[in-house]
Image (cartoon, rainbow, N blue to C red):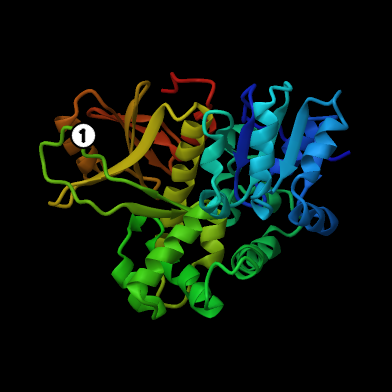
Amino acid sequence: MEYIIPRLFRPPQQSFFLFGPRGTGKSTWLRQNMIGAVWVDLLEPDEFRSYSARPERLKELVLASREKKIVVIDEIQKVPDLLSVVHSLIEKKLGLRFILTGSSSRKLKKTGADLLAGRVIKQTLHSFMAVELSRKFDLAAALKQGLLPLVFSAVDPAAVLRTYASLYVREEVQMEGLVRNIGNFSRFLEAISFSHGSLLNTSNVSRECEVERKVVESYITILEDLLLAFRIPVFSKKAKRVTIVHPKFYYFDAGVYRSLRPAGPLDRPEEIEGAALEGLVAQHLIAWSSYRGEKNKVYFWRTAAGSEVDFIVYGEEVFWAIEVKNTSKIRMEDIRSLRSFKSEYPQSKALLLYRGKERIQKDEVLCIPCDEFLLNLEPEKIELF
């Protein structure tokens, strides 16, 4: 029997959207935890055609199964008209709990998901966190293959990664008609991989893929709506120095980034792996914040003079300044920006994550092995260091 890795996601007791990129295990988690629910799988061609033609069929199905109080609609964005039916059934106060999964929020935004505001809350299932994998977590493997459950459980992870982006392009972008020129979008996916972990400069991306800047901006929005990427804003609360305004860009998973990032004789391997390491930390911080109920937000800090700290985690619970270094040895210049941030925000906890094996205290900066940090980043705990 295949071993199922327990997830850290904790569902709310009310109706909820469960978003997440393809392959994060939404359906697997629901099959395990919502046994006996009324189930509508819109990835099945017959069900898709049936509900597309007559969305009100959902009401008939639910009312005919009165003893079942949980209703799962998998990939709700395929038939967004079902939202009106869900809304109607919730208003009848029949004690039903709806769980609506999706790998894209684009169609739902356009067709009025807001009509469920307050009745159905939004949740996200992310790639695996290191703490979920425990002893199965391997930092070197995670930097190459990422932590997407679909890839992690595959016999040939590299082969799955090679096809992942193309499947997304075909099924989510091309079939839904989100872009006019699929060739331009494919070049864009590769070009923007160079921005992973960097300030997002749409003009540079535009030149690289030979697509107009406005089109590039729309492509970035599509990536975010498909949950394939996210942007991190700059931290500027009570800033004493001038900070930049451009956000940083990340693909949602280190393995997906590696599969899209071209490499050649002019590319330094350590540069690509450094960006992958930073992205791996980013996806963990985003997942940790999400599973804790979004009480803390993830930022980065960069002054106009060039001082930069990779991540600032700030909220009602924590205030962390985190620098990530793809090195096994720490130099004093590696902690310079953290010390600068600490001088401006003495309330913060300054951390440097590196590829070494020991915890080291350098001035006010705690240096922690990156794998140790990730394995301790557990949503149930707040006192981590």
Helix, strand or loop at mark 1: loop
Q: Nearer the viewer, residue 359 or 255?
A: 255
Whether residue 3 appears in this view of the structure is: no
The residue sitting at 69% across, 26% down in the picture is 92
The amino acid sitting under disc 1 is: Lys
- Relative to 237, does residue 95 appear above or below in the rendering? above
Q: Nearer the viewer, residue 296 or 78?
A: 78
Q: Which residue is mark 1?
A: 237
- Describe residue 313's horizontal placement relative to residue 187 as left or right: left
- The image position of residue 38, as x and y in percent, is 82, 35
- The image position of residue 165, as x and y in percent, is 60, 65
Picture quarter with the N terminus: top right
- Describe residue 46's horizontal placement relative to residue 274 as left or right: right
- Relative to 345, does residue 61 appear above or below in the rendering? below
The residue sitting at 87% across, 30% down in the picture is 65
Q: Nearer the viewer, residue 228 or 377?
A: 228
- The image position of residue 179, as x and y in percent, is 52, 71
The residue sitting at 62% across, 50% down in the picture is 103
Q: How many marks?
A: 1
Whether residue 118 appears in this view of the structure is: yes
- The image position of residue 84, as x and y in percent, is 64, 42
